Amino acid sequence: MLTMPHVRESKSYIVMEEVKETLALPIEG
C-alpha cells in the first residue's frame, strides 16, 4: 500500500487544521 506512509502525515495535518480552527474561534468570538 503506497498510501500507508502518508496516513500519519494526513492525520497530523488534519489535527493541525482542527487546532487552528479551535484557536481561531475565541479570537473571532
Image (tube, rainbow, N blue to C red):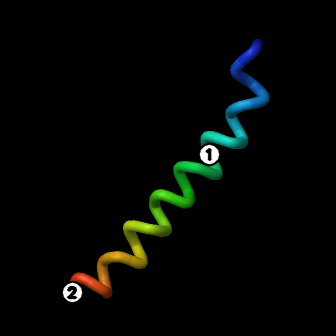
Q: Residue at x 70, y 20 (%)?
A: 3
Between 27 and 1, the one lying in front of the other is 27
The C terminus lies in quadrant = bottom left
The circle on residue 24 is none
Location of mark 1 (residue): 11
Classify 18 as above or below 25: above
Crowding around mark 1 (Cα neighbors within 10 Å: few <14, some 14 to 19, many 20+) is: few
Classify 22 as above or below 16: below
Location of mark 2 (residue): 29
SS label for mark 2: loop
Say which amino acid is labelled 1.
Lys
Say which amino acid is labelled 2.
Gly
Distance from the alpha carbon under mark 2 to that under mark 1: 27 Å
Q: Residue at x 62, y 45 (%)?
A: 11
For marks 2 and 1, the one nearer the N-term is 1
Residue 7 image position (x, y, % from top left): 68, 34
SS label for mark 1: helix
Classify 21 as above or below 2: below
